[in-house]
């Protein structure tokens, strides 16, 4: 029986064997109770499979939006289904990505002026969508992507709870950008995205300082370039 342990419980197999050794306390009544448990698990599995089939059938017309959401780091089929079910496939109802993030409660509180006393409460919003991004943020934090790097940077400085909210904000903005552009997919800039950005800023500051020392006044302005990959631009909107 101890060998039937799963996951983390397998590390305790010796203790389980010791606990079950000479288990004269295990009666027929205990056996009857244990027999009911797997039957209930099988019943729940059957019901879950039936409901999953219904969900797949209802969301079939929105397969494109589901695949777009699945392309984001930390997302999968189930989070994509839940998110599309909550927001709908049409992003025009949210004037901007920030509106969607605010609707889900993934933005900082801004309803109090002056010094706040005690711990601030979380922003109210769609609690189902907030729960989805809470899980996808943690999952993305374990990946070698820009989102993963962002989560880890924030978690070190501000704690995991605030990192979840901040990354959830980013994910919803990317989600909005993707679903607003049919046919696009998320293109990750890479886990060194922030290091590259910092390097670029340092180089700009260095050259501007050199020109200023020569008596020039410089205003940096990026040259507009056509975007060869709209999906990549949309994914970096946050």
Image (spheres, rainbow, N blue to C red):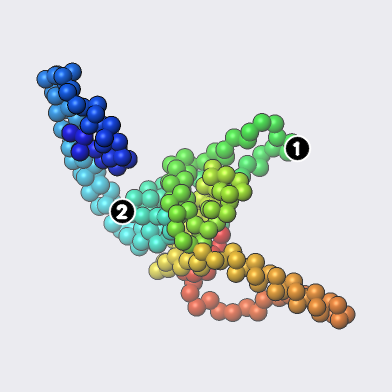
Decide if residue 130 is in sight here: yes
In the displayed structure, 28 sits above or below 57; it is above
Image height of 70 relative to 165, above or below: below
Label 1, on which residue? 114
Q: Residue furthest right?
A: 215
Q: Pointer 2: residues within 10 angstroms few (<14), some, or many (20+)?
A: some
**Disc 2 designates what residue?**
59
At horizontal 47% and vertical 40% (from top left) the residue drawn is: 127
- Quarter residue 39 falls in: top left
Residue at 50% x, 58% y is 147
Residue in front for this viewpoint, 70 or 21: 21
Q: Position of residue 196 (x, y in %)?
A: 60, 69
Q: Residue 167 in the image: x percent, y percent?
A: 53, 52
Q: Position of residue 114 (x, y in %)?
A: 75, 37
Label 1 to label 2: alpha-carbon separation: 46 Å
Seen in the picture, residue 124 relative to 99 is either above or below; the reply is above
Q: How many marks?
A: 2
Residue nearest the observer in this picture, 166 or 210: 210
- Up/down of 28 relative to 220, above or below: above
Discs 1, 2 touching: Cβ within 8 Å: no
Dividing the image into 4 quarters, which one contains the C terminus? bottom right
């Amino acid at each position: 029986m101890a060998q039937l342990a799963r996951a983390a419980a397998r590390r305790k197999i010796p203790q389980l064997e010791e606990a079950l050794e000479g288990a004269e306390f295990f009666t027929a009544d205990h056996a009857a109770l244990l027999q009911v448990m797997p039957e209930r698990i099988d019943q729940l599995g059957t019901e879950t499979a039936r409901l999953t089939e219904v969900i797949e059938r209802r969301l079939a017309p929105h397969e494109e939006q589901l695949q777009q959401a699945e392309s984001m780091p930390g997302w999968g089929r189930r989070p994509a289904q839940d998110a599309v079910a909550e927001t709908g496939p049409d992003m025009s109802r949210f004037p901007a990505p920030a509106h969607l993030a605010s609707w889900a409660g993934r933005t900082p509180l801004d309803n109090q002026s002056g010094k706040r006393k005690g711990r601030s409460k979380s922003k109210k919003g769609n609690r189902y969508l907030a729960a989805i991004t809470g899980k996808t943020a943690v999952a993305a934090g374990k990946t070698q992507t820009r989102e993963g790097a962002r989560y880890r940077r924030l978690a070190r400085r501000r704690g995991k709870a605030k990192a979840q909210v901040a990354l959830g904000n980013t994910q919803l903005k990317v989600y909005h950008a993707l679903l607003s552009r049919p046919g696009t997919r998320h293109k990750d800039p890479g886990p060194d995205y922030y290091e590259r950005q910092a390097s670029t800023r340092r180089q700009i500051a260095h050259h501007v300082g050199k020109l200023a020392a020569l008596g020039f006044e410089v205003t940096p302005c990026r040259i507009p370039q056509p975007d060869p990959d709209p999906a990549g631009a949309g994914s970096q909107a946050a």
